[in-house]
Amino acid sequence: MPYTILMLASTSFFSDYGNHVRIWEEAKAIQQLGHRLVLATYHNGDDMPGLDIRRSWDVPWIRRAVVGSSRHKLYLDVALSWRSLRVALQLRPTLIHAHTHEAAAIGLALKRLLGIPLILDYQGSMTSEMLDHGFLRRTSPLFLPLTRLERLINRSADAVITSTHHAAVLLRRDDAIAPDRLHVVVDSVNTQRFRPFDGSPEWAAQRCELRRQLGIPAGRRIVVYIGLLAPYQGTNALIQAAQLVTARHPDVHFLIMGHPDPASYRAYAESLGVAGHVTLPGRIFYRDLHAYLALGEVAVAPKMSLTEGNGKISNYMAMGLPVVAFDTPVAREILGDCGIYAAYGSVGDLAAKVELALDQPALAEERGKCGRERAQRELSWERAAREIDAIYADVLARAARLSHRIP
């Protein structure tokens, strides 16, 4: 049975990073099942083909993407609330699917107004993200109220979808969410587009041209990273590890792709004396990402956050790249036995494990092949969409049963 879905995203969609990729791929896959989907989001960001996007009021002094916690979100969420209300009254959706807790708070008001279910797509703890970004301190008088608000939103949603089993475990422990309302739909990947370099002349020529455009010297072995640039993402640790690796292996080059503010990280690399071995090209369009990842011999996932998902790992795996990651529950869950793990937060061990992957090609090939097979077997967006569709059906059936009990 086709549904009409109002998807809410309190972010500058689309901006070519992890959570936005999940929103985009989910929306496409859900639409392919025959459902109508409308996305309400902030005023800025790229439009995406085939997706009905309704944007909030224009804010002319904010043009770049708002990433993570920001004081600007206070009024951007007010604008999104108004747009979401107007769209909901016009659309009369079957249900609301909200990404981020701020969007779920808006969805909660619409749920009560329209009497329809709310699904929270949980990508990590709201308060933990604020702590990671330095937007909030545990000693702040706002910390406890915001923690309670987050738990209220979690408990008020008719279903919570997490991208990792680790996040589901944390929610069960901390928020007492009923097991029948908590679901896991892991970050997935298009394994047809993200696939290992096949050695064809066309692809080889493309790789050479990309290297030339990026200014990476010939003969360098490339370590790749894609994602947000921020301390909690491990960007500082990665550049410090690059300093250690390139001191011992001058033929290694680090291609660190993403945004915001790559200029400050270029300056940081220069301050460490590794500017000649680190390239930070800034934002890479998602449609082109597979071509850039194909330059790499090793991929790194140094994320420091212990509550968020880590969708980039799925892309690395589909490319058949050996993946070096900090040893976190989320990385272990995605990679399993296919990963190469560095001690959490240790720059020295991160560098050592990157060198291990570079210096032992048989090990690198085995881990890359393992990851590719795991991605093909377990991480398709088609499978994820079917799981989400089943969650929708369950939530709607439960709502129907409850409505029949009310006189």
Image (cartoon, helix red, strand yellow):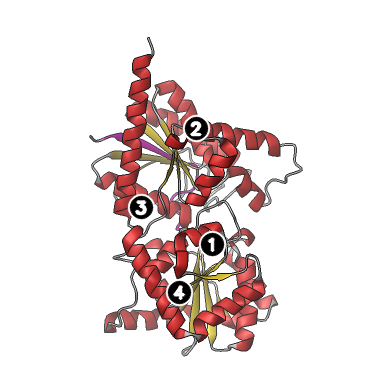
User: Badges 4 and 2: C-beta atoms under 8 Å apart?
Assistant: no
Task: Name the residue at 62% across, 88% down.
Answer: 248
In the rendering, which numbered label is found on residue 106?
2
Crowding around mark 2 (Cα neighbors within 10 Å: few <14, some 14 to 19, many 20+) is many
Q: In front here: 360 or 300?
A: 360
In the rendering, which numbered label is found on residue 377?
none
Residue 36 sits in quarter: top left
Frontmost of labels 3 and 1 is: 3
Task: Name the residue at 45% across, 79% down.
Answer: 364
Name the residue beneath numbered marker 4. Answer: 322
Q: Is residue 38 above or below residue 338?
A: above
Task: Name the residue at 57% across, 60% down.
Answer: 328
Instruction: Locate residue 265, reporting x and y percent.
Output: 62, 69
Q: Is residue 187 above or below residue 356?
A: above
Q: Secondary structure at mark 3?
A: helix
Q: Is residue 360 above or below residue 321?
A: below
Give the residue type that dot 2 points to: Ile
| CA distance separating discs 3 and 4 | 24 Å
Frontmost of labels 1 and 4 is: 4
| CA distance separating discs 2 and 1 | 28 Å
Instruction: Locate residue 66, reporting x and y percent.
Output: 55, 50
| CA distance separating discs 1 and 4 | 23 Å
Q: Is residue 129 magenta?
A: no
Name the residue beneath numbered marker 1. Answer: 259
Crowding around mark 4 (Cα neighbors within 10 Å: few <14, some 14 to 19, many 20+) is many
Residue 204 sits in quarter: bottom left
Q: In front here: 167 or 54?
A: 167
User: Badges 2 and 1: C-beta atoms under 8 Å apart?
Assistant: no
